[in-house]
């Protein structure tokens, strides 16, 4: 699939490329990004190059991962989001915000836009969010974006060779007032 560009009231959401390597490298020097996400630690220039020049473009090309950089009008990188296809109709969202732009709602705004795109253009009927237990910032973004936190999965995230418990949540098309591609019949106790 060819990469797409999305816009929100405050952001330009587009794939990243070689021109963004330095911004990705700088953002990933943040100890919180290295602690709470699966980016390598220490995060080296070659990691940023591999992400912007191979991983992100390959994900779009083979339809497995759709990565968006969230950019402010001045061109600053505010965050990174991606939807990874997990199974038929299910995508998993991951995101991080740059340290200097946290607390402004940019990642929440971008997460809603990317989920809306996945529901309307990708035939996704469930977007899952997972974060290591304790990552309260990620949970706050997910909840503000409308995700329902469904529980805790034991030993479900491998972060740098250590299995950790994670919170899991979901966003459905109906949560954004959109139709599903297939009927949904909620369980009744």
Image (cartoon, rainbow, N blue to C red):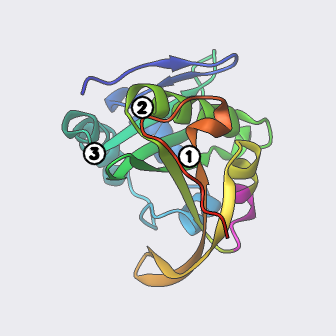
Q: Considering only order in the chain, which callout, 1 or 2, is on the residue closer to the N terminus?
A: 2
How many marks on residues?
Answer: 3
List the residue tagged with mark 1: 27
Residue extending furthest left?
Answer: 62
- Give the quadrant of residue 178: top right
CA–CA distance in space, label 2 to label 1: 11 Å
- Give the quadrant of residue 11: top right
* Looking at the image, residue 183 lies above or below residue 168: above
Give the residues drawn in magenta, as a range.
134-139
Other-residue count near label 3 (Cα within 10 Å), few / some / many at <14 / 14–19 / ≥20: some
List the residue tagged with mark 3: 64
Q: Considering only order in the chain, which callout, 1 or 3, is on the residue closer to the N terminus?
A: 1
Which label is found at residue 8? none
In the rendered structure, does residue 123 fall within the stretch colored magenta?
no
Visible in this render: residue 28? no
Helix or strand or loop: what does disc 2 sit on? helix
Q: Main secondary structure of the magenta part?
A: helix
């Amino acid at each position: 699939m060819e990469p797409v560009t999305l816009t929100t009231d405050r952001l330009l959401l587009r794939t990243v490329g070689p021109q963004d390597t330095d911004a990705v490298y700088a953002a990933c020097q943040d100890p919180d990004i290295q602690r709470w996400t699966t980016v390598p630690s220490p995060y080296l220039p070659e990691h940023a190059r591999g992400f912007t020049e191979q991983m992100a473009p390959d994900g779009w090309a083979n339809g497995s991962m759709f990565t968006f950089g969230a950019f402010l009008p001045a061109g600053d990188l505010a965050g990174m989001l991606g939807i990874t296809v997990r199974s038929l109709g299910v995508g998993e969202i991951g995101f991080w915000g740059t340290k200097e732009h946290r607390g402004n709602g940019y990642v929440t705004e971008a997460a809603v836009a990317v989920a809306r795109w996945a529901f309307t253009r990708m035939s996704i009927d469930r977007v899952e969010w997972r974060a290591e237990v304790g990552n309260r910032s990620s949970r706050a973004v997910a909840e503000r974006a409308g995700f329902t936190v469904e529980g805790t999965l034991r030993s479900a995230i491998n972060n740098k060779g250590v299995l950790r418990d994670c919170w899991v949540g979901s966003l459905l098309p109906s949560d954004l007032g959109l139709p599903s591609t297939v009927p949904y019949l909620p369980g009744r106790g």
